[in-house]
Amino acid sequence: MSGHSKWSNIKHKKEKSDAKKAKIFTKLGREISVVVKAGGPDPDVNGKLKDVIAKAKSNNMPNENIERCIKKASGELGGDNYEEITYQGYGPSGVAVIVETLTDNRNRTAGDVRHYFDKFGGNLGQTGCVSFMFDEKGVIIIENEDGKLDEDAVMMDALDAGAEDFTAQEDCFEIMCQPADFAAVRDALEEKGYVFASAEVEKIPQTTVVLSDEKDIISMNKLIDMLEDNDDVQNVYHNWEE
C-alpha cells in the first residue's frame, strides 16, 4: 500500500500483500474506521468511504470484513480512535519520503518512524519539507498480462471517463486523473467491466532520484520495507527511481 511506481513494483507490492493479507486488512480496517467516523457509514453519501471500499475490494478484502469494519466504526460494535499523521523526511542520498499513518498512539508511531529513518541512513524533517516535490493524482492500473485488452479502446474509454493521462506499459495500462475526478473516472471504467490492479489517489514525485551506491540502494529498500511492515503506516511515497 505504498506510493506511485512502475508496474513491476505494483506486482511486487501485490505479492507482498498476498503473503500478508492480515496486515493489509488491518491497515484497510483503520482507513475505513477513520472515513466512517468523519463522513458516516453510507458509501452513497460518504464518497471517501466508497473510495476505501473500492481499494479494499481490489486488495481482495472479504465483504464481511468490510461490513464489520463499517459497523465497528459507526458504533454498532464499539471501536478505536485513530488519527492521521503524516511524516516527511529524507532517505539515503536525499531521497524524499512521505509516510502517511493512522495511529491510536502517536508517541509509539513517531518513535518507530524516526528509528527506521535513523537506522537506514535517513532523517525525519519538518512538516512540509518534501511535500512540495509531489503532486496528488488519481492513479488507476488495469492489468493486461494476457494482452487481450485493446490499447486504443482502453485509452478512449479512459479519456472519455475524464482521465488526463494514459500510458501503456508491457503488461498493464496506467491511467491518471485529477483527484477531484478520480471517483468518476474509476466508476465509469468499472461500469465498462475493467478490473483494477490498483486504484487510489497517490502522491506522484515531480522528479526522481537515482541511487548509484549499492549501500544506499540496500538501505533504501530496507527503509521502505520496515515502514510498510509497520501496522500504523498506511502509505509510503518516495521519489527514488528504482
Image: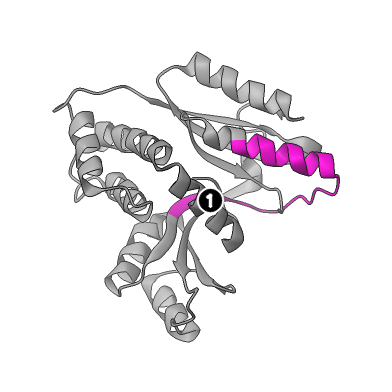
27 lies above or below 146: above
In front here: 58 or 19?
19
Residue at figure coordinates x 72%, y 23% from the top left: 118
Disc 1: CA contacts within 10 A as few (<14), some (14-19) or many (>=20): some
| Structure colour scheme | one colour
**Residue farthest to the top?**
107
Query: Image quadrant of residue 29?
Result: top left
Residue wearing tag 1: 13
Where 195 falls versus 84 (above or below)?
A: below
Residue 41 covered by magenta stretch: no
x and y percentages locating residue 130 in the rendered image: 66, 38
96 horizontally vs 82: left or right: right
> Hey, which residue is sitting farthest right in the picture?
213
Residue 81 percent coordinates (x, y):
32, 22
Q: Residue at x 60, y 28 (%)?
A: 127
Q: Quadrant of residue 25?
A: top left
Is any atom of residue 165 visible in this view?
Answer: no
Q: Secondary structure at mark 1?
A: helix
Amino acid type at circle 1 is Lys
Q: Is residue 201 magenta?
A: yes
Q: How many marks?
A: 1
Residue at 50%, 73% in the rendered image: 145
- Where, by quadrant of the figure, is residue 237 drawn? top right
Residue 132 visible in image: yes
Is 97 left, or right, of 189 in this rendering? right
What is the residue that sits farthest to the front in this orientation?
19
Q: Nearer the viewer, residue 196 or 83?
A: 196
State the residue at coordinates (30%, 75%): 192
- Position of residue 197 measured from the top left corner of the image (x, y, whole percent): 44, 61
Q: Which residues are magenta?
A: 200-225
Q: On the picture, is 165 further left or further right than 239?
A: left
Residue 71 position, x and y percent, is: 17, 34
